[in-house]
Image (cartoon, helix red, strand yellow):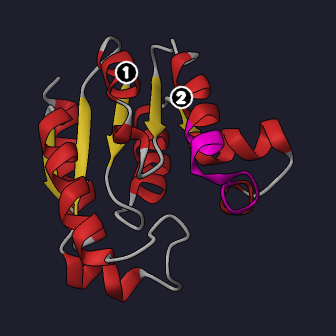
Amino acid sequence: MYSLIGFQKSGKTTLGRMLAHRLGYDWLDTDIEIEKKTNIIAKEYYKTFGEAEFRKLESFIISGIVADKTVVSTGGGAVLYPANILHLKQYGPVIYLSISYSCYLQRQDEFPVFVANNLQECFVERAKRYEEYADYTINNDSLNTGFAELIRICDGQ
């Protein structure tokens, strides 16, 4: 199993789907799993029920992942609960898709619902957590370069 972590818009969903296809693995996106479980778009669930309920459901979903040949795309806040990442590490490496703040701003289409005040401060704080938990870090400012590096890491496993 490979788990992808990183800030919103870092490419976890895009590269996760591509990697799963390339490896012949299943693909699981925690936001999509939230949507399946609640019949509500993940962002709307967050807005309606708040961060605590969203993170609780996200953690419940992550704790139920015991798959072997699966690529997991986590939500950007999954690292806020260390148990999430420690669970995923039991089944395989955790890969941080790092992007620059300027790249994030280019990819971002609206202000994220989870940030109350300073977006850049949140970005920097989360980056520290991603780096702490990652077995590998890939710069993904360019999706093509990031995917090539991701394949290199997975082929070396």
Q: Residue at x 44, y 82 (%)?
A: 108
Disc 2 from disc 1: Cα separation: 8 Å
Q: Residue at x 13, y 37 (%)?
A: 132
Q: Is residue 124 left or right of residue 18?
A: left
Q: Is residue 32 above or below residue 124?
A: above
The C terminus lies in which quarter of the figure? Answer: top left
Q: Residue at x 73, y 54 (%)?
A: 45
| Secondary structure predominantly adopted by residues drawn in magenta | helix
Residue 87 image offset from top left, x and y in percent: 38, 16
Count of numbered tags: 2
The residue tagged 1 is 83
Q: Are marks 2 and 1 in contact (CB under 8 Å)?
A: yes
The residue tagged 2 is 59
Q: Is residue 156 above or below residue 66?
A: below
Residue 131 image offset from top left, x and y in percent: 13, 44
Evaluate whether residue 144 shows in this view. no
Which residues are drawn in magenta? 46-55
